[in-house]
Amino acid sequence: MIIKQDTVNKVKEHFDLNIYETKVWIALLSKGIVTAGETAEISGVPRSRTYDVLESLTKRGFAIIKVGKPIKYIAVEPKTVLERMKTNTLNKAQEKITVLSNLKDTAEYDEIVQLHKEGISPINLEELSGHIKGRANLLSKLKEMIDSAKKEIIIHTTVEDFEDKSRVLMSVLNKVNKEEVKIKLSLSGDSYKVKRLSSRNELKIKESNQIGKYFIIDKKEMLLMIHPENSQEEVGVWINSPYFASSLTTMMDKGN
């Protein structure tokens, strides 16, 4: 069976293999069980490299060594390889999360936190503003802002945008102490969707005709989304200005 080069490239990328490993594994899959010499002939990989590649594939669970002489290699079913890769990825991710979670208890973490405090303290509030690009970066900033709220969280956006961000937004909003922090949530768009979101998430959501998407925390900092609904990449402007945030909040309250 002839494999297209495009397929070879995609297998290489998806299964995190180098080009020789990809060609050898495909050769194994095409025959089921082969010797190193046969593998070299089928795959086109230099014979001198085939042994190393087969050993690498065996260690990573893509192939099994058949007992006997001559030594032969058996291809592992792609489904099994995929499941093993998923498990390994989850285990590595959990290990990384554990390491990151424990960083706060280290002396070096305390040192860099102190370094940041000393570096940021002389800066004027109006200088602490920035342009944030990319969905992941915006969601991370939103989570950080909501987590820091002490008195009030104001969210105004479209119902589609809120639904799109709901997994992150709801997970952090549900942790807010409602007795201490007031949540004002207003959404524009389809009325039925707004009511459905309100009942499903047990949130008090106000319908709004205002356009725009913004998030204001404690009348101190805010995040303004500056892209249209169908934009390919989300872009926002973060502003740390109590004067501006408070003024905009008052203006919005009057508008409602």
Image (cartoon, rainbow, N blue to C red):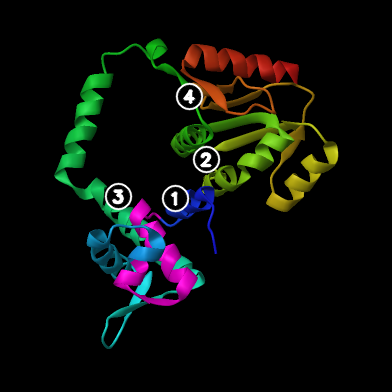
Of marks 2 and 3, the one in the foreground: 3
Q: Circle 4 — which element?
A: strand
Residues tagged 4 and 3 counted as in contact (Cβ below 8 A): no
Whether residue 18 is visible to the viewer of this picture, yes or no, is no
Q: Kindly identify the amino acid type of the residue bearing the numbered disc 4.
A: Ile
- Residue 13 shows which numbered tag? 1
| Residue located 82% across and 36% down the image | 190
Which numbered disc flags the more N-terminal residue, 1 or 2? 1
Q: Kindly identify the amino acid type of the residue bearing the numbered disc 3.
A: Leu
| Measured Cα–Cα span from mark 3 to mark 1 | 27 Å
Q: Position of residue 60 (x, y in %)?
A: 32, 67
238 part of magenta stretch: no
Residues tagged 1 and 4 counted as in contact (Cβ below 8 A): no
Question: What are the residue bounds of the magenta stretch?
Answer: 16-39
Q: Kindly identify the amino acid type of the residue bearing the numbered disc 1.
A: Glu
Q: Residues within 10 Å of mark 2 (few under 14, many from 20)?
A: few
Which numbered disc flags the more N-terminal residue, 4 or 2? 4
| Measured Cα–Cα span from mark 1 to mark 2 | 49 Å
| Measured Cα–Cα span from mark 2 to mark 3 | 30 Å
Residue holding disc 3? 100
| Measured Cα–Cα span from mark 4 to mark 2 | 29 Å
Q: Quadrant of residue 127?
A: top left
Q: Quadrant of residue 154?
A: top right
Residue holding disc 4? 132
21 part of magenta stretch: yes
Which numbered disc flags the more N-terminal residue, 2 or 3? 3
Which numbered disc flags the more N-terminal residue, 1 or 4? 1
Residue holding disc 2? 180
Q: Circle 3 — which element?
A: helix
Q: Quadrant of residue 251?
A: top right
